[in-house]
Image: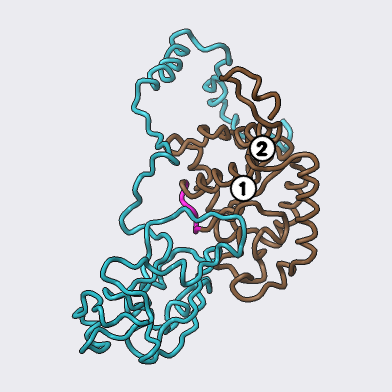
């Protein structure tokens, strides 16, 4: 096709997109954001047996400005929701969110006036993780699935195009708060 | 002496007994002792499980994803009674029953579960649905890798939950094993499908 045919073998060729995706996926910095019992399992993930350092993300940053992954671990009360949103806004782009556990994903068994019925009412969620609480392997599985998503993320014009599509879809979709039945 | 000062030195006895050492660099021996702990750690057995490659088996009764079981000839065990949905503390299960007929038979007895959904974003894996199930149709597997990227994908339909057809099973709907009724199914007298059960 072009340059790659003239190069001797042994050269690794890739696009900037793939290179950036590869680097981003291997240097995620989670924010310390434990809200309830799921946080205990999140802490367990950094211990020797599970060792999140194998994925290059063992350091949970205390400051959201140094983090690019928010693991919402636990139920979010209505009072905590603005705080959660502020922490998310303070994180620098690009950023991702994992809703860990049933409560963060949908409100779980707490279907009442005090608990936000899923953090996707407040922030955009990339990966939903069921479980009450999910075992450390389940969180690692969610992180690996997120890595896959980050690895295939687009850049530049392609990214702008996808953002436009997502926005159009979000405007057309039913608001989360109006969802009925099992989706609520 | 002001009014606010603590009155501990009234007798004068406690004054000379308190001695606070001045902080400074630790002795060489103390430092070496600390480094030794770090050094010796590299000869210890590694406890890390290399998760995505090596998967440690869970406890045998681990509460994982649900499964809807079948009778040995392939008929579904679920009778659509909704007891699991009633038992669920998180309202994660939705069941709609429908009537069996001799032409369209999905399970032994009168009724079967036509719609069966479990919302895994609500489910807390407590197992109360399994305790409630009168026919052992609903059980839990040890599968736990469930994370996904949308709410819709995490509502599992009946097709996702049903156990696979094993050898000797036929895809329902199909009639009873010849010469049996629902009681024979519940007493375990049907052990495999009969060729005549296959529906065209």
Using the image as rendered, state which of residue B176 and residue A7 is in the foreground: A7
In this picture, residue A143 sits left or right of residue A4: left
Answer whether labels 2 and 1 touch (C-beta < 8 Å). Answer: no
Residue B181, by quadrant, is bottom left
Reading the image, the residue beneath label 1 is A71
Indicate whether A58 appears above or below B42. Answer: below
Q: Give the CA distance from mark 2 to mark 1.
A: 13 Å
User: Which hue belongs to chain A?
Assistant: brown
Magenta stretch, residue numbers: A131-136
Question: Residue at the location (68% across, 59% down)?
Answer: A120
Reading the image, the residue beneath label 2 is A62
What is the chain letter for disc 1? A
How crowded pointer 2 is (Cα within 10 Å; few <14, some 14-19, many 20+) is rated as few
- A135 is within the stretch colored magenta: yes
What is the chain letter for disc 2? A
Question: Residue at the location (41% across, 71% down)?
Answer: B128
């Amino acid at each position: 096709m072009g340059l790659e045919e003239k190069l001797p073998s042994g050269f690794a060729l890739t696009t900037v997109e793939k290179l950036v995706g590869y680097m981003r996926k291997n240097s995620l910095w989670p924010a310390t954001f434990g809200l309830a019992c799921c946080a205990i399992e999140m802490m367990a993930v950094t211990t020797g047996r599970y060792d999140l350092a194998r994925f290059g993300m063992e350091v949970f940053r205390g400051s959201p400005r140094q983090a690019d992954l928010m693991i919402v671990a636990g139920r979010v009360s209505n009072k905590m929701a603005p705080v959660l949103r502020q922490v998310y806004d303070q994180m620098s782009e690009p950023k991702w969110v994992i809703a860990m556990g049933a409560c963060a994903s949908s409100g779980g068994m707490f279907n009442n006036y005090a608990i936000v019925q899923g953090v996707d009412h407040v922030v955009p969620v990339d990966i939903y993780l069921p479980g009450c609480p999910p075992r450390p392997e389940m969180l690692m599985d969610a992180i690996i699935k997120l890595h896959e998503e980050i690895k295939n993320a687009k850049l530049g014009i392609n990214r702008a195009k996808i953002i436009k599509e997502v926005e159009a879809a979000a405007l057309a979709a039913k608001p989360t708060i109006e969802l009925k039945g099992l989706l609520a | 002496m002001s009014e606010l000062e603590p009155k501990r030195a009234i007798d004068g006895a406690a004054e000379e007994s308190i001695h606070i050492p001045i902080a400074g660099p630790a002795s060489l021996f103390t430092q070496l002792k600390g480094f030794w702990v770090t050094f010796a750690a590299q000869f210890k057995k590694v406890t890390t499980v290399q998760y995505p490659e090596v998967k440690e088996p869970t406890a045998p009764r681990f509460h994982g994803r649900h499964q809807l079981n079948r009778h040995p000839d392939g008929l579904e065990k679920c009778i659509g009674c909704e007891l699991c949905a009633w038992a669920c503390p998180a309202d994660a299960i939705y069941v709609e029953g429908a009537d069996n007929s001799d032409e369209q038979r999905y399970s032994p007895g009168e009724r079967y579960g036509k719609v069966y959904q479990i919302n895994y974003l609500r489910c807390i894996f407590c197992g109360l649905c399994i305790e409630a199930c009168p026919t052992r149709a609903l059980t839990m597997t040890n599968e736990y890798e469930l994370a996904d990227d949308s709410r819709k994908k995490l509502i599992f339909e009946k097709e996702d939950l049903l156990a696979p057809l094993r050898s000797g099973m036929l895809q329902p709907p199909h009639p009873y094993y010849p010469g049996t009724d629902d009681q024979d199914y519940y007493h375990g007298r049907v052990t495999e499908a009969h060729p005549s059960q296959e529906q065209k």
